[in-house]
Image (cartoon, helix red, strand yellow):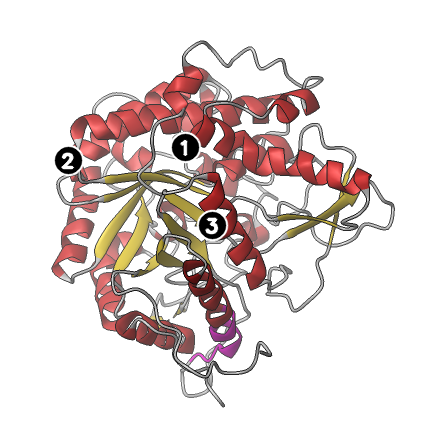
Amino acid sequence: MPESAQPATPVTFPPAFLWGAATSAYQIEGAVREDGRTPSIWDTFSHTPGKTAGGDHGDIAVDHYHRYREDVALMAELGLSAYRFSISWSRVQPTGRGPAVQVGLDFYRRLVDELLEHGIKPAVTLYHWDLPQELEDAGGWPERDTALRFAEYAQIVGEALGDRVEQWITLNEPWCSAFLGYGSGVHAPGRTDPEASLRAAHHLNLAHGLGTSALRSVMPARNSVALSLNSAVVRPLSPRDPADLAVVRKIDDLANGVFHGPILHGAYPESLLAATELITDWSYVLDGDLRAINQPLDALGLNYYTPALVSATDADASGPRADGHGASSHSPWPGADDAAFHQTPGERTEMGWTIDPTGLHELIMRYSREAPGLPLYITENGAAYDDKPDPDGRVHDPERIAYLQKHLAAVRRAITDGADVRGYYLWSLMDNFEWAYGYEKRFGAVYVDYATLTRTPKSSALWYGEAARTGSLPPLPTD
């Protein structure tokens, strides 16, 4: 069936399927100096000249800290059944250590209560990249102590919210935290040290394991603990070329195996250790670490945007950097200097990312095999477009509707093929601070006028809301 054709029968989802949207604290909250909050690495990074587009930062962002009731009411009006948000660590523990600042926790208590009053299921992400700056000053994620501090933080938040929040995610996209933050330097804290990026990856894994144990020690057994991986769908430029296939394996290890190996299987891939032996000796993996990391999960979150097309080093390689998060002369792939990345063919979003829903289906089915019996959630999926209001003030974004329709149909195909996918969180609820891209890229289903902070649901928000209310994919608009 052509992608533009309408299905003959409605594409329906299981009755309990969660229809959600996602955000992160630094991208939306603002209020960065209120109620005891101290700088995170993203405050520092975004205020460093040349690090973000236009010198943009999240000081105000979209002011969700003061407008959360308005935003929750908007979610309810759209018909969402779930909302995934992250906690600002430095709002709760300003130094990354010690007792909580209760006024910081109170904001999240109010937010959770507001969501529950509107019948929306909260899903809490503990870490979405905004490490307290004081912990970075002490060494950051390359240091073991940061993982220990994370476990203490997880326990504090679990004690505060665990009676009302059932869905928990320890880390969001630890690959970005480790390899973009400490390898290529395009994300905070902006370091460019390949060995530090691998150390960071291990200590993020350890943080997940210790944090999972800490959460379970203070929360009801009914609660679900997961993490969200931006696992890559890595494809060879030439499927029959042994050199290309070898590079695919190397990138797959660095993108995926470095996390799901220890988390799901209790060991790092031997091929990963061999590929990186000239960069690090892995001596920071201490006795007991892998057991601590390999905690049973209640679910796994998958974030997907676009596949990667790779080959052995080739002077003709083209296309955006494989990290998809900005340009840098430093590679986020330690030990993979023989890899070249190519632009995948097809229609692209405003980010330059190819639209390929087959990659989402492929990713879901891979993890259905990698972790049989483990429930899956799509915790991020979405697209950036150059959205603008019409003269009448409405924001029409048919490209995003088409994107969502194709990717949700891919999720439904995976369910038909036996995958236990229980929910989908659109990225993002509303336009916001898009990291190094500042405010140039709009991923939101809700348009935000950054001058007035007025929220306007785009046509995609109305389409997605209808899907959430009916449990089936509405027809594509014909205008």
Q: In the visual, does 81 lie left or right of 384?
A: left
Instruction: Name the mark nearer the viewer: 2 or 1.
Output: 2
Q: Position of residue 20 (x, y in %)?
A: 32, 60
Q: Residues within 10 Å of mark 1 (few under 14, many from 20)?
A: many
Q: Amino acid at mark 1?
A: Leu
Q: Amino acid at mark 3?
A: Asn
440 with respect to 72 (left or right): right
> To which residue does mark 2 refer?
220
Determine which residue is flagged by label 3.
303
Pick the residue in front: 233 or 334: 233
Is residue 305 visible in the rendered structure shown here? no
Mark 1 or 3, closer to the camera = 3
Q: Which residue is mark 1?
A: 131
Q: Quadrant of residue 323?
A: top right
Closer to the camera in the image, 475 or 207: 475
Span highlighted in magenta in the image: 395-403
- What SS does tag 3 mark? strand
Q: CA distance from mark 2 to mark 1?
A: 27 Å
List x then y, in percent, for residue 445: 40, 68
